[in-house]
Image (spheres, rainbow, N blue to C red):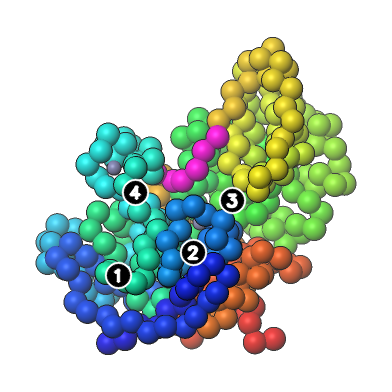
Amino acid sequence: MQAKAMVVTTPGRLEFRSFPVGEPAPGEVLVRTRATSVCATDVKVFHGQVGRARFPLIMGHEFVGEVVAAGREAAARHGWKEGDRVTPEPYIPCGRCAWCRTEHHYHNCPDVRLYGISIPCDRPPHLGGGYGEYVILVEGSLLHRVAPQTPDLAACLSSVVGNGFRWVKTLGEAGFGTRLVISGAGAQGLCTLAAAIACGVGPIVLLGLSADETRFALAREFGAEHIVAVDREDPREAVPDLLRGPPDVVIETSGVPAAIRTALALVRPSGRVVCIGLSGGRETPVAFDDLVWRDVRVVCGKGQAGNVADAVRLIDSRRVPFEKINNTIFRLDDLEKALAATEHPPAGFIKAAVVFEAETPTAQRGSGR
Ligand SMILES: [Zn+2]
Ligand SMILES: [Zn+2]
């Protein structure tokens, strides 16, 4: 059997290549890829801006696959069998160090590997990313079973929804009645919104730009009550009005320096600001005296260690149509177009995904036009 994959040979260069697919080793699971969502990180990896990336590389770390064969131990220990659908966590921890014995910090493991980023395809297991027809899920992977009724385009977002739970529960410590502002209406903001609503957080205000109308419409479908376009209305006036006071927690997902400053200004005394957006090297001037006087806690973070099980539970519940986040669909040979759309989003774009099956019921095609 052969697997076709899109390989980043060196930063900026994509090439279609074929790999032989063998039997999985005892601890491995071989999956046929069903859908892979395109992450903004993929664009940075493609341009050679991610230090951990190892080339030649099959990118893609947000994916769902169907088990074709499970190695002897993987089958015995976890019960994996042909036909199961599975979504892996992007981080593959070593499982032995002190970081790996923590619930929420195993992504800091010094020997952690990352699907689609740090597993080069020029040596075994070769197939280490979601932009290939098959992926070898290596021993030590954290795999989550997906319910039969869950669409592939929702299941492949397990780590992104896991991020949402991390910002809300683990870093934001938000729960029932927490007044929350979410800054940024991209995939991270939308998944944060869904996680927050699932946790009983509220009232919630979502901040975005007037150009985000497609995202706002989906946010309303997810259950957003209050949305503010910050280029139309000043959030420093609108938010306290809508929440009847300042927010307890602000989750800033955009990384835009002006948005980070707004987040810090909005939060109540002794409140928490969770900053997870990357600014792409830009600096944000911050008056720390003001944060000291107001007892503000700023928490930064990445990853979804310990938060993906919650995500899969919410995705499988079908209470939230997560598949609509992946609203622009590509075939594998159009990966370069998918990356371009992610880097320079056309109107109405939320997130791109590569699908490997013919049926793409909910989203529009991004290629072939
Ligand atoms: Zn990602
Ligand atoms: Zn470790």
Distance (Cα) linking label 3 and label 1: 33 Å
Task: Classify mark 4: residues with Cα within 10 Å, few (<14), some (14-19) or many (20+).
Answer: some
Q: Residue 3 vs residue 234: left or right?
A: left
Distance (Cα) linking label 4 and label 2: 26 Å
Question: Disc number at residue 123?
Answer: 1
Q: In the image, what residue occupies the spot 27% across and 47% down?
A: 94
In the displayed structure, 219 sits above or below 31; it is above
Q: In the image, what residue occupies the spot 55% across and 60% down?
A: 48
Viewer-side label of 3, 1 = 1
Instruction: Please tell me whether residue 44 belongs to the stretch shown in magenta.
Output: no
Q: Residue 151 vs residue 148: left or right?
A: right
Q: In the image, what residue occupies the spot 42% across and 61% down?
A: 54
Work out whether residue 147 can be spotted.
no
Q: Which residues are magenta?
A: 300-305
What x and y, as percent, mark residue 238?
Answer: 82, 35
Q: Label 2, secondary structure: give it.
A: helix
Q: Tell me where residue 268 sits by quadrant.
A: top right
Residue identified by numbered label 2: 154
Residue identified by numbered label 3: 188
Q: Which badge, 4 or 3, comes first in the chain's sequence?
A: 4
Instruction: Look at the numbered discs 4 and 3 and tell me whether their residues touch, using CB distance below 8 Å.
Output: no
Identity, as a three-letter code, of the amino acid under mark 4: Val
Distance (Cα) linking label 1 and label 4: 18 Å
Distance (Cα) linking label 1 and label 2: 31 Å
Q: Which badge, 3 or 1, comes first in the chain's sequence?
A: 1
Would you say the beta carbon of the disc 4 residue lies within 8 angstroms of ligand 2?
yes
- The residue lying toward the viewer, choosing from 199 and 47, is 47
Q: In the image, what residue occupies the spot 69% across and 12% down?
A: 293
Q: Label 3, secondary structure: give it.
A: helix
